Image (cartoon, rainbow, N blue to C red):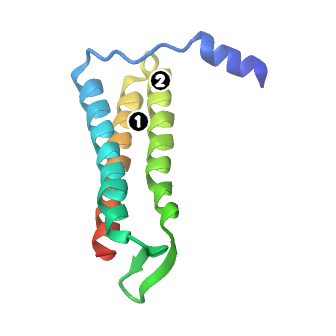
Amino acid sequence: MKLRLRKFFLKFEPLPFRQPLVRTSLILSLLFLGLIVFLLIGRLLPLIGDHEFVVLHYNVYVGVDRVGHWSRLLVMPIIGLIAGVVNVLSASWWWERERMLALYFLIGTVVIEFTMAVASLLTVLVNL
């Protein structure tokens, strides 16, 4: 295991940020992550006020099916950040070997962050 990690870090090269697709995907990913944090902390926390519990999930068939403490909402930006870091590291690893796969990782990061931003927006709207 140690040998594999050492081999990974010895062959690791950062992404070329001068490439337009790399730069655009990283900027969009960071913007969506910032939007998630703004929606959940900037917009939802003032609405909560003294309420300790918020709606965490809404289902079309049943209605509200998950209620919990407001701090559980911070799981979304944490998952988005972890997914973004893992995808960017994977794209860096694959950039010199297989560029198309690296581009899929970068575009996948933007898709994940966009999906999380939409989920955050809908969570804020359900808690109004």
Q: Position of residue 93 (x, y in %)?
A: 50, 22
Query: Which of these two is toward me, 16 or 52?
Result: 52
Give residue 24's position: percent from left, percent from top.
Answer: 24, 30
Quadrant placement of the C terminus = bottom left
Q: Residue at x 36, y 49 (%)?
A: 37
Real-space CA distance between mark 2 and mark 1, rounded to the nearest whole angstrom: 9 Å
Of the numbered discs 2 and 1, the one sitting upstream in the chain is 2
Residue 87 drawn at (x, y percent) = 46, 35
Q: Residue furthest bottom?
A: 62
Q: Nearer the viewer, residue 111 or 37?
A: 37
Q: Amino acid at mark 2?
A: Trp
Element under disc 1? helix
What residue do we see at 34% from left, 75% from top? 127
Residue that lies at the very extreme toward the front in this rendered image: 50
Q: Which residue is mark 1?
A: 105
Q: What label sits on residue 117 in the rendered view?
A: none
Q: To which quarter of the image does residue 84 belong?
A: top left
Q: Residue furthest top?
A: 10
* Direction from residue 75 to residue 104 in the image, left or right: left
Name which quarter of the figure residue 102 lies in: top left
The reply to whether callout 2 and callout 1 are in contact (CB within 8 Å) is: yes
The vertical placement of 83 against 45, above or below, is: above
Q: Quadrant of the N terminus?
A: top right
SS of the residue under disc 2: helix
Q: Which residue is mark 2?
A: 94
Up the image or down, 51 lies above or below 31; here it is below
Label 2 Cα crowd, 10 Å radius (few <14 / some 14-19 / many 20+): some
Residue 59 in the image, given as x and y percentages of width and height:
40, 81
User: Relative to 75, is 67 above or below?
Assistant: below
